[in-house]
Amino acid sequence: MLFIKIERRRLLFFFDFFVKFNKNKLNNTMLKLNLGKISLLANMRNFSIAKTLFASTNALAESNDSLVQSAKSQNTKKSRKNPTIAAVFDTLSKEDEIPQKLSSDKLSIDEIILKAKTVNGLLNISEANKEIIERKHALKIVSRLAEWSSIDQVNLSEFENDPRFIKLCRMLGRAVKSNSTATAPVKKPETVRSSDLDTVLNVKNDDEAAKLVASITMSQMVKVMKNLGITKRRSTPLLRSLAFNICGKDEKLNIKECSDILYAMSNLNFPEPVLMSKLCDDIQLGLQNSQIQKSSAIGSMLTSMSFLKYREPVVLDALTQWILQNQSICRTQDIAALCMTLASLNYMPVAFENEIKSKLIPSLTVYDFKNSLEYLTFVWSLLALNISNAEAFNSVLKQEFIDQLTNECKNEIPIGAKIKLLNINGGVKLFMPTYKGAMLTRSVHENIYNIPLVYNQDKQLLSKSMADTLKNIVPEACLKVNVDTHMGFLVDAEFYVDEKSNPISNATANSKRIALMINHYHDMCLGPKQYPSGITALNRRLLTQAGYEVIDVNHSEFSVNDLLLKRVQYLQNLLKPKH
């Protein structure tokens, strides 16, 4: 079953990748290529760089050349059996009308490459300017040939054994196997692989770099991905090519490689679902089969999943179990990363809940965190996980901690930290009636309370649309919108209803207080199933404890583009009494 799952995932991804990557270059016929061929080509490891490049761009289609073209190809091939004859033949060729030799008063090499109209014209450029030709020029020529081949403008057989083409391929770092007498000795694999990797990393043109990805090994793809994450170079074509080629291999990634890829994906905000699915499969196998000596990779993966908001319960369970079983070798920051990730993803592993509360949480103190901001996030995580810890809550609500936090943040506490403080303050009021510790007050902590709670543009439009729609259901005098709870978030819309669910302007003995809350895309976790994020779920719990009946309005079901009638009907169905 695992094999079928992997094969199905690969085939679906191959199709999706080629539609996205080649949509501006390939016609509809090219999109109908046999997926079996594509999968086979993607796994050929010891192929020449030329054939690999064309496999990446859906080449190697069947030739439909005319009889004249066929004869020409045969004659060319015969002449190239002898390098001397081939050189004479190429010298006599007049297919291009532009100059192939660079001079001070004429075109640059890049311009000549762009103006070349034929295979022979392109290949002649490297020979005519061999003293100054560089790898970037070789890459541009080979990429141009790959593009022509992908649209059936030329056939691979026309130049794959041409000495000039083989020489260009060697410049790119990969020796090409050929029967040609002009082929130079094959370089050592280590040198070739290193050269290929440098080529991909140094290519500034994203499309050209993406074409070269198929020519490097899985471990080098991981290195390229990591490098992109470190330099924060968010090249979508290159990232998609990396994801496509990584998912296209049966080779399993080890824990360190999974950690590096997740780090890059989180840094670049690139939550590719198919790649995430492969990583989750490989993480589970890696945790079962590997003897991991350090916890740093585990902590890194947890932190990356938190940033990506990717909620996969099976993987979170496996990572939690590993930390519990290996707590003696775990760094405190990695244990803290587990708690903060579970909180941000709104997930508590039921099988390990008691051990998390009794073993992991008590092992962490304020001194295990590098700064006050990180410790505040950890304490907020306890609230989000519904873990009551009066001592921890008191420690961050004390004036001494707030002063220390203010100093560390250069006299201006970030808005995110203020929201966490207000969340915790509201939580101890509502969930811990016997709490006697420090509290925030508006008179003393006005700078924390008075923060701009502003949505992004998409959510603002959604909120306004919901408010306008509600005015057709609830009298405007009864309706309030964007109500500040003073707990770090807004109520999108609220009103009271009587015992018959009719809107009323003021609260009565039997009335209910309704809160409509929008669940925007960014309020949800990614993953196999959609769940509200940790902060979204916490806000709902705080409102429920404060006496509201909370009704969620999901962005996938309520759209600003829907007709007014459809929006009204949707909200009316939500507001119907639940029996």
Image: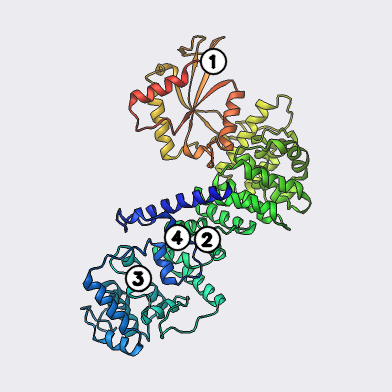
Q: Which residue is mark 2?
A: 225
As measured in the structure, the alpha-carbon distance from the residue carrying label 4 to the one carrying label 2 is: 9 Å
Residue at x-position 76% and y-position 50%: 326
Q: Secondary structure at mark 4?
A: helix
As measured in the structure, the alpha-carbon distance from the residue carrying label 1 to the one carrying label 2 is: 53 Å
Q: Type of residue at label 1?
A: Lys
Q: Please tell me whether mark 1 or mark 4 is closer to you in this view.
A: 4
Residue at x-position 54% and y-position 41%: 528
- How many labels were placed on the picture? 4
Please say if 365 is above or below 238: above
Q: Earlier in the sequence, mark 3 or mark 4?
A: 3
Q: Are marks 1 and 3 in contact (CB under 8 Å)?
A: no
Q: Are marks 1 and 2 in contact (CB under 8 Å)?
A: no
- Across and down, in percent, residue 200 comes to 47, 68
Q: Which residue is mark 3?
A: 156
Q: Secondary structure at mark 3?
A: helix
Other-residue count near label 3 (Cα within 10 Å), few / some / many at <14 / 14–19 / ≥20: many
Quadrant for the C terminus in the image: top right
Q: Are marks 3 and 2 in contact (CB under 8 Å)?
A: no
As measured in the structure, the alpha-carbon distance from the residue carrying label 3 to the one carrying label 4 is: 24 Å
**Is residue 104 left or right of 447 when viewed as pictured?**
left
Q: Please tell me whether mark 3 or mark 2 is closer to you in this view.
A: 3
- Across and down, in percent, residue 322 comes to 71, 48
Pick the front one: 355 or 470: 355
